[in-house]
Image: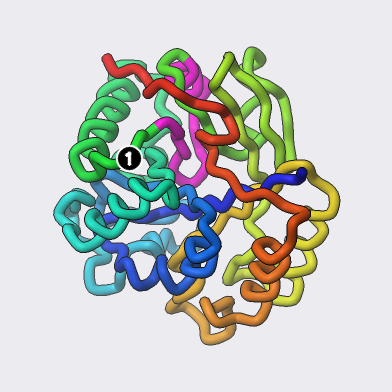
Amino acid sequence: MPTIIFRDDDTSYFTKPLLLEAIYGRVWEAGSPVCLAVIPWVYGDTRVYWTDGNPHDPGIPPEHRGKAENFPVSDNRELCAFLNDKAAAGLVEICLHGYTHTFYEYITHDRAVIRQKLDAGMALLERAFPAASIRTFIPPYDRISPVALEELVARGFNISTRSLNLAPVPQLPQISGFAAGEIRTDQKLFVCDDYFFSHKRDPAESLRLARRALARNDLTIVCNHYWTFFHPWRPQPNRPDNTAWNDFLDEALNSDKYGVRSFSAYAGRRGAPKTC
């Protein structure tokens, strides 16, 4: 049976549970899991350096943009309670999404820095989400160095990233598109090379590409940024009540042709990653 994994990036101190509920409520009502890439200690003045003008990261609410301080996800008690309940029910997989989520955070080749960030990020998420078992790493902005990938492999993390990061690490499966490859027993690499439902794309085109992926692939990773559905930059983009998104959920959730799983369930994970 073809499998769908729902992955959503950038949950952080700033995330309101009602926004996640507005997008994924139907998935949870169907008893299916969503994998949330959670930022442990988000930095308020994070910039997007590949965009002209180096704008602030759109996942940071306008009232907090430019603040040169960090915000631990554990201080958002409403969010933590909400996600712990979901994790305990098997409806959310909490994934480690960097540490502060700055743009170049994990492209460093400094092993000591990488290890410190992994340890600190895991410790913070484990305190915030005691109901969760954190086994999957998703790099900020899908930018990550070969050295960081080697550290993740050594610690036993599942990894979800874009295929363009893989070539310098030949011991990893060299896969592309939407696929999973085995790193070791119970440890997998997941690649996701497109974000269908984006504010940069017409909703009808989003739906067409998502349908095509379901038809062609044994595994489709549906990766969103929740803030895309509430994007402040322009009036057009996908919204939680957008017909395209709901049509996709109709097909994904109301058919016996597909199964919905989390990264860890797909990998058959039992143990937690190692810390130093």
Front-lying residue, 46 or 248 = 248
Question: Magenta segment, which residues?
Answer: 135-153
Q: Badge 1, how many Cα within 10 Å: few under 14, some, many 20+?
A: many
Residue 230 visible in rendering: yes
Report the number of discs: 1
Quadrant of the rendered image containing residue 14: bottom left
Q: In which quarter of the image is the N terminus?
A: top right
Classify 221 as above or below 203: above
Classify 188 as above or below 242: above
Where's residue 9, x and y in %?
46, 53
269 sits to left or right of 108: right
Residue at the image point whose x is 44% and y is 52% from the top: 91
Where's residue 174, x and y in %?
71, 24
Residue 44 visible in rendering: no
Q: Which colour scheme is used?
A: rainbow
**Secondary structure category for the residue under label 1:** loop
Where's residue 215, x and y in %?
84, 54
Front-lying residue, 102 or 255 = 255
Three-letter code for the amino acid on which mark 1 is drawn:
Ala
Residue at the image point whose x is 45% and y is 19% from the top: 156
Residue at the image point whose x is 44% and y is 74% from the top: 22
Q: Quadrant of the C terminus?
A: top left
252 sits to left or right of 81: right
Classify 203 as above or below 49: below
Residue to which mark 1 is pinned: 132
Classify 270 as above or below 56: above
In the image, residue 140 lies in the stretch drawn in magenta: yes
In the image, residue 67 lies in the stretch drawn in magenta: no
